[in-house]
Amino acid sequence: MTQKTSESHILVSMTYISRANPDMSDEAFSDILRQAQENNVKNGITGMLIFNNYYFLQTIEGSRAQLNHLLGNLVNDPRHYDLQLLETRELKGKGREWSRWSMNLALPSTDNAALYLKYSTTAEFNPYLLSAESIRELMTELNH
């Protein structure tokens, strides 16, 4: 008897960065966050989002099929541009890092400014200049 493995059971983590459109309002960002949280709950996706008015930096976790579908939607979303996929990896036996969050949000503040600078290569936070490993470490520290 051959066992059929469903793609939906393969958990994947995907990290990407993109640039926010300059005309994005606070209301539009709130809509993005609300929509992501609602859709992620429905689709079994968890994750962490960092936003600083210029950049989106996000790690999402879920089935490979769901994340590929979501990535297609993200690429076509006019609220941001220059999307770059930094890392995709299977979560073999480790489980989800963001299992408690349909979408955790971290915003730069005076309380965590030193943490952003610890991982940044410049005085201004620019995730395009960070390695995937540095991004994972930053997100882990922001979550604690």
Image (cartoon, rainbow, N blue to C red):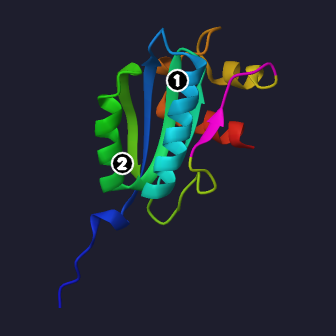
Residue 75 at x, y = what percent? 31, 30
User: Which is more toward the observer, 42 or 110?
Assistant: 42
Report the residue at 28% width, 70% height from top. Answer: 6
The kind of residue tagged 2 is Leu
* In-image side of 40 versus 53 (left or right): left
* In-image side of 33 versus 21 (left or right): right
Residue 15 at x, y = what percent? 45, 38
**Label 2, on which residue?**
67
* In-image side of 142 versus 78 (left or right): right
Q: Main secondary structure of the magenta part?
A: loop
Could you give the CA–CA distance between mark 2 and mark 1, rounded to whole angstroms?
A: 23 Å
**Label 1, on which residue?**
28
Q: Which residues are magenta?
A: 103-110
Give the crowd class for mark 2: few <14, some 14-19, many >=20 residues within 10 Å. Answer: many
In the picture shown, does residue 125 fall above or below 107? above
Residue 55 at x, y = what percent? 51, 19
Q: Residue farthest to the right?
A: 111
Is 82 in the magenta?
no
In the picture shown, does residue 105 fall above or below 42? above
Quadrant housing residue 90 = bottom left
Comparing marks 2 and 1, which lies closer to the viewer?
A: 1
